[in-house]
């Protein structure tokens, strides 16, 4: 499968990895939209939220556990941070391996564009 993020999991494409567990990996976004912009991905390939099944509930939970730990390590937990997972092109998804954006270090506006 020709998936960019699977290649990062496999170590075939470099990334600045900030978190690593049995189920998840996190690395800095190549085009950061905030002082902290990290992508948390499952090691397992899942293309979109629509492709998740019941067996993936713990996997998705592990992405948020990772986000919490990353936010603490980045020093943005108390001020606040945003987690975003886009689903399909209409919502802005451009890499079809689910990923949780963790953004912080600047004020966030609402609603997002
Ligand atoms: P999305 O548009 O929600 O699918 O998010 C995909 C994100 O992946 C974007 O924020 C890109 O900047 C980021 N991205 C694309 N290629 C890489 C890469 N090689 N390393 C790190 N981040 C990447």
Image (spheres, rainbow, N blue to C red):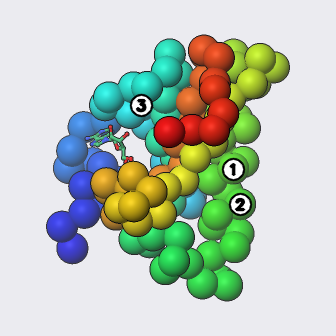
Picture quarter with the N terminus: bottom left
Height in image: 67 above or below 105?
Answer: below
SS for callout 3: strand
- The CA span between labels 2 and 3 is 20 Å
Viewer-nearest residue: 29 or 86: 86
Question: Which mark, by number, is residue 64?
Answer: 1
- Whole-percent x and y of residue 21? 57, 50
Label 2 neighbourhood size at 10 Å, few (<14), some (14-19), many (20+)?
few
- Whole-percent x and y of residue 49? 53, 70
Earlier sequence position, callout 2 versus callout 3: 3
Question: Which mark, by number, is residue 28?
Answer: 3
Viewer-nearest residue: 30 or 44: 30
- Whole-percent x and y of residue 103? 57, 30
SS for callout 1: helix
| Residue extending farthest right | 78
Residue placed at 38% from the left, 33% from the top?
A: 29
Height in image: 10 above or below 74?
Answer: below
Give the side of residue 90 with respect to residue 41, left or right: left
Q: Does ligand 1 reach within 8 Å of label 3's beta carbon?
A: yes
Q: Does ligand 1 reach within 8 Å of label 2's beta carbon?
A: no
SS for callout 2: helix
Q: Does ligand 1 reach within 8 Å of label 1's beta carbon?
A: no
- The CA span between labels 2 and 1 is 5 Å
Q: Are marks 2 and 1 in contact (CB under 8 Å)?
A: yes
Earlier sequence position, callout 1 versus callout 3: 3
Q: Quadrant of residue 66?
A: top right
Residue placed at 74% from the left, 24% from the top?
A: 80
- Whole-percent x and y of residue 51? 49, 80
Question: Which mark, by number, is residue 61?
Answer: 2
């Amino acid at each position: 499968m020709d998936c960019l993020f699977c290649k990062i999991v496999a170590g075939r494409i470099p990334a600045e990895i900030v978190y690593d567990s049995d189920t998840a990996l996190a690395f800095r976004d190549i085009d950061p939209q905030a002082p902290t912009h990290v992508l948390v991905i499952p090691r397992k390939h899942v293309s979109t939220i629509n492709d998740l099944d019941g067996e993936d509930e713990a996997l998705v939970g592990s992405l948020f556990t990772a986000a919490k730990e990353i936010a603490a390590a980045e020093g943005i937990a108390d001020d606040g941070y945003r987690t975003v997972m886009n689903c399909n092109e209409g919502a802005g998804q451009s890499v079809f391996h689910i990923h949780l954006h963790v953004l912080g270090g600047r004020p966030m506006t609402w609603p997002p564009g």
